[in-house]
Structure formats: C-alpha cells, structure tokens
Amino acid sequence: MASNGGETPHRRGIMTREMDLDAIRYTSSIKFDTEIMKAVIYVNVAHIKELAAANYLEPSTALEAAKTLAELLDKPITVSDEEDIHIAVERHLSQGYPDVAAMLSFGKSRNDAVVAAVKIRLRERMLELYLELLKAAETLLKRCIREAETIFPVYTHLQRAMPATYGFVLASYALRLIKTTPQLKHVLDLCSESPLGSAAAAGTDIILNRRRLADMLGFERVSLNALESTASRDFILSALGVTHAIALILSSIAEEMVIYSSEEFGLLKMPDELAATSSVMPQKRNPVVAEIMRTKAGETLGHVAAVSSILARQPSGYSLDLQQVTPKVWQALDEVVESLRLLSKMVEKVEVDVERAYKACMPPTAAVFLANYITLRYGLPFRKAHGLAGRISRLIAEDRLGRDTLAKTVSELGLDLTLSVEEILEVMEPRRAVKAYVGVGSANPSKVVETAELALGRVAVEREWAARRREEWGRALSRLLG
Ligand code: ARG
C-alpha cells in the first residue's frame, strides 16, 4: 500500500502487490508535477466534459465532478509517494466521485494527457519569456535613444576599433534579443497542437470529438499522429533551444558589462544596487549580477545536453525516460526569465563614464576616417592612405605627432600632400567621426535613433500579439470552467 493510503487505482488488475516505496519515489514525477498541476486539472475537466457530451458519463454528475476538480486550482492537493499527478488527481476525485474518476482513463492516457498539460503550461511560460524579452529589448532601446550621442568605443578582437556611441551598442543587444522572437513564436505554435484523443500510443476506439477537446483547452489544432504526439518531446527541445539562444545573448552582454566595468576599461560603472563589495578589500565593486548572468548559458546548455541525451536512442512510443525531459525546460525558463528581468534593471541603471569613453575614442581610434579622408581629399588609393594613416596612428600612440614628424613620414612614404596636424585631429575627432557615418545600421546617432524607434514599434506589435494569445487561452479556459 502506498503511504498516501488506499490501493493505487490502476494497480488492482495485473499487479498483486503495491509498488515498492523506494521504487515509487525513484520513478515518480510528483516533485516537478507541481508545475503542470493546474494544466492537468484543465485537461481532466475537459475530458470529463467531453465524456459527458459523448454520453459516456451522466451529465450532471460529470459537471459536479468537474467542479470538484476545478476547486483544486485554488487549493492544490499535497501529494507524496504517488507515481505522478495524474494518478494523484484520479485518486483525489475517486473519494467524492468514484464513478467519474474511474472514467478518467477512458479514451485518454497519461501519455496524451501529460503532453497536453505540458503544452498548456509551456505556452504560458514561453509567453512569460517572450514578454520579459520584449521588456528587456524595450529598456535597451529607450536607453539607446537617450545615449544615441554618448561617444563610446566599439571593439573588434577586443581592441579599440572605431568610435561609436553607447546607444549604438545597446541597440545591438536589443536587436539580438528581438531576432529570437520568430523562434519563440515557433515554439508557441508547436504548443498549439492538441495531442488529446491520441491516448497511449495509437489512438482510441472511444468516440471523442478531438476538435472540441482542443477548443476547450485553447489549442488551435489537433495532432495528426498519435505515436508522434504522445512520444515526441521535440517541442521541448525547441523551447530549450531558443531559451539557450537567449541565455547565450545574455551571457555575452553580461561578459561585456563585466569587462567594461573593470577599472582597466573603466567605461561603465555598476550601480550600488547591482554590485557587491568585498568583505576584505574595501575598495571593491564587484559586478556580481553580470557574473551570475554569464553563467546561465552554461546551465541552459546543460539542460539542452541532458534532454538531448535522453531523447537520443528513444524508440518511438512513450517511455518513462520522457518524463525526465520536462523539468529541464522549467529550470531553464526560470533561469533565463530571471536573467532578463535583471538585465532590464542593469540596463536602466548602469552608468557610463562619459569622459573615459570619449577618451577611448580619441585619435588614433578613428584612423579609418583619416584613411578615407586622405583618399577622398588627396586622391590617394585607399591602400596607400591606409599605410599613411597607420604611420600617423603610430606617431599619435607614441605622442610624437607634430608638423615635423608628419612631414618626415609623408616624405618617407614618397608622397606629396599638404595634410596638416590640425586636419588630422579634426577628422579623427570622435563626435565629428560618429556624425560622419552614413547609411542604415551605422553608428550615426540619427540612424541609431531611427533604428531604435523602428524596433520599439516592432516591440509594441509583438506585445500586442502576445496579449491576444494570452486572452484567447484565457477565454477558452474560463469557458471550460464556467
Ligand atoms: N509522469 C509521466 C510524465 O511526466 C506521465 C506519463 C506516464 N505514463 C506512463 N505510461 N507511465 O511523463
């Protein structure tokens, strides 16, 4: 006998003894079924209603039983030592409505029920991720507009590359995040297919209206192959895939924040609220939020790896291995949603050391502008202009740029031009350089603002789309319970 009392409802046939307690605990999903508890109730309520509609249950008793089940939405049962939430729910219902409880697996299996419940919960969790991602993108874009003129260097090979603005850098993060939304939508689409009616593996001979069942739960369509819909967890891997992709983006942003806020770079300063200090070195300001954020991609990769290795070598029908896949996606979502929340805070509050950022863009950072200028103004082929600008960069780096050294360099290269020190410094002045960028996508402040405004529009559209989805599901579920 299980420690929850009474015989386990489905073990009275072929089994003559209850399952060993350690074995139940070892194989049970009950610890992580809390995540799908509500969804399991919805699925069972829908099933009871469908059984009544198809005359397999007496309608008024079915309705009462459904109501009793729905009460669990507000005060969940605490269960232990049960195979899973599906059995726990059946056992619970059997106390008041044994005849209805006894029909929960009529035309339905835990195999299709669990997929339905996971999809119902996952669509909600993915939407939460979606909205949090949009919020982070919006925060980035709003700050981007404020910082569109804040001179800030960009790096390649982590060497100063070109002068740009802090707004430009923030917009690059925002766009990376926004580019994951088609993948998020794809996962939501995978979640909008109802497996109910697939039963254990090959469908059922019980006549149930699959379309109606799907509608009751806010699914858009029914699955087309029972084996696939009960035993595939590809949709979870897709969910993990995009969650991991987002974690990777967060990780690289966080890494950059750590680097830029180090004293060696000194471009950013973490606000007190998001930094820790040392218990022994009083001068320390440690960017701990960003440090933890960059670890999350490792965690999500771990979940992807765990799920991949479970799904590898799976025969086609359901095996209990699949149960172990589900909690990984909840864990990954917990981590990434929280990280996005903190990213929004970090982006709002991080301070730019405007002077150091400007200084980092001072000559020779804009050397490519000088080379281009020499080509345009003096008609030198770019490769030659590049060579001269390189020599001038060296003079600047060595603090030796002057009229004489410049003249010597020009003549050493066998050139004949009237380029002056003043001209050089003017062309390479960061503010001038940044305004000289042309074209969509460049760091020109006006282009950056245009991009940010466009992206903010996209965020608003996406948000509306998400709200509509949520409303549709909400409407279906309140109809179901009404
Ligand atoms: N706890 C299981 C899971 O999460 C439910 C399905 C169990 N099916 C079965 N035939 N034992 O996947």
Image: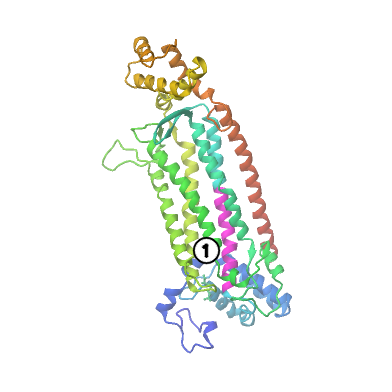
Residue 363 in view, yes or no: no
Is residue 113 covered in magenta?
yes
| Left-right relation of 93 to 286 | right
Q: Position of residue 204 (x, y in %)?
A: 65, 78
Q: Identify which amino acid the numbered label 1 is placed on.
A: Glu
Magenta: main secondary structure: helix
- The quarter of the displayed image where residue 411 is located: top left
The residue lying furthest to the front in this view is 414
On screen, 77 above or below 138? Answer: below
Residue occupying the point 56% across, 35% down: 142
- The quarter of the displayed image where residue 141 is located: top right
On screen, 130 above or below 265? Answer: below
On screen, 99 above or below 144? Answer: below
Front in this rendered view, residue 438 or 201 = 438
- Magenta stretch in the rendered image: 111-132
Assign a secondary structure to mark 1: helix
The residue lying furthest to the bottom in this view is 16
Is residue 60 covered in magenta?
no
Mark 1 surroundings: few (<14), some (14-19) or many (≥20) residues within 10 A? some
Rendered image coloring scheme: rainbow
Q: Which residue is mark 1?
A: 35
| Left-right relation of 341 to 362 | right
Residue occupying the point 53% across, 87% down: 12
